[in-house]
Image: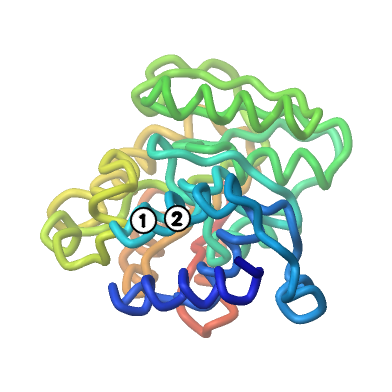
């Protein structure tokens, strides 16, 4: 079959299953199995797809039909201009989280010590290390499987970072200049209403913020000051409706000049302050 017809077949199947962004996903899956790029559909649509490529595409589309995330099928996700390995053990990096990295970069100076709590794939910490000089980074997660992914991403990017398995601060030592965290913040009851790609395929450990979504913010706020140097900044990603609550938690725990930052969609996304 030719390239355009194979794409049309995949698109039809995904649309029939009401897959969000079916056009993009059908194209990206075809590019993945054929090792092509986005120009091929228009410029080389008459390209012959081999039997091996066609079978691989059918298998990939079948996975996407079952709402397995595109990123889990391809195995990677772009973030901050970098490519990160992802799988079912880590939260898929999202563009919203780039707001946290960008705000942190405004406070990071070369040579600083950075602590990333709930590091997952390591995308936040590794992005900060990639775009700064001589910073020392520590990433913490309770999931050893997630930490394995983070270590692979560090190796892939040629970066040095320390990744520690710890229940929050239990195994953390030292003090840091910058603290960043994208903790679980979705209310337990809300998770069941999320799209299947999220509630069925992303790690519950990275999603569930307990009853009101603020459990981990409270835990982290009461403990993190012991690990921060004087004047250190702390930055948290938040849900769109959590700005006021997290700001109050930071202020109650002694942080100064606490601000809520909006993302590109105009939604509250980051809360930051300093000691």
Taking 189 as reference, is 249 left or right?
right
In the rendered structure, the answer to whether residue 111 lies left or right of residue 222 reads right
Left or right: where 51 falls relative to 65: right
Q: Residue at x 63, y 76 (%)?
A: 4
- Read off the residue under disc 1: 62
- The image position of residue 157, as x and y in percent, is 77, 34
Is label 2 in a helix, a strand or a loop? helix
Question: Splitting the image into 4 quarters, where does residue 105 fall?
Answer: bottom right
The residue that label 2 is drawn on is 58
Pick the residue in front: 109 or 193: 193
Front residue of this view, candidates 57 and 193 = 57
13 up-or-down from 273: above or below: below
For mark 1, give the secondary structure: helix
The answer to the question of whether label 2 and label 1 lie on touching residues, with beta carbons closer than 8 A, is: yes
Q: Residues within 10 Å of mark 1 (few under 14, many from 20)?
A: some
Residue depicted at x 60% and y 63%? 28
Residue under the image location 39 percent in, 70 percent down = 243
């Amino acid at each position: 079959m030719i390239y355009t017809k194979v794409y049309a077949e995949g698109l039809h199947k995904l649309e029939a299953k009401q897959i969000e962004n079916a056009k993009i996903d059908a194209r990206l899956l075809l590019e993945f199995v054929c090792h092509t790029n986005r120009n091929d559909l228009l410029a080389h649509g008459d390209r012959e797809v081999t039997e091996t490529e066609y079978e691989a595409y059918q298998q990939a589309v079948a996975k996407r039909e079952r709402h397995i995330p595109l990123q889990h099928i391809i195995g990677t996700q772009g973030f901050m201009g970098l490519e990160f390995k992802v799988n079912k053990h880590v939260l898929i990096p999202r563009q919203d989280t780039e707001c946290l990295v960008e705000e942190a970069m405004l406070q990071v100076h070369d040579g600083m010590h950075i602590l990333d709590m709930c590091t997952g794939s390591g995308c936040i910490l590794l992005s900060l290390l990639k775009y700064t000089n001589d910073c020392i980074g520590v990433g913490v997660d309770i999931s050893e499987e997630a930490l394995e992914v983070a270590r692979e991403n560090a190796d892939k990017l040629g970066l040095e970072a320390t990744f520690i398995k710890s229940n929050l601060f239990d195994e953390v030592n030292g003090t840091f200049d910058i603290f960043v965290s994208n903790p679980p913040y979705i209310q337990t009851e809300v998770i069941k209403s999320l799209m299947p790609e999220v509630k069925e395929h992303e790690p519950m450990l990275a999603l569930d913020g307990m009853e009101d979504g603020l459990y981990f913010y409270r835990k982290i706020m009461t403990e993190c000051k012991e690990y921060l140097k004087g004047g250190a900044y702390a930055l948290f990603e938040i849900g769109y409706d959590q700005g006021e609550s997290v700001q109050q938690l930071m202020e109650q725990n002694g942080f100064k000049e606490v601000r809520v930052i909006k993302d590109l969609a105009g939604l509250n996304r980051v809360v930051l302050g300093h000691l």
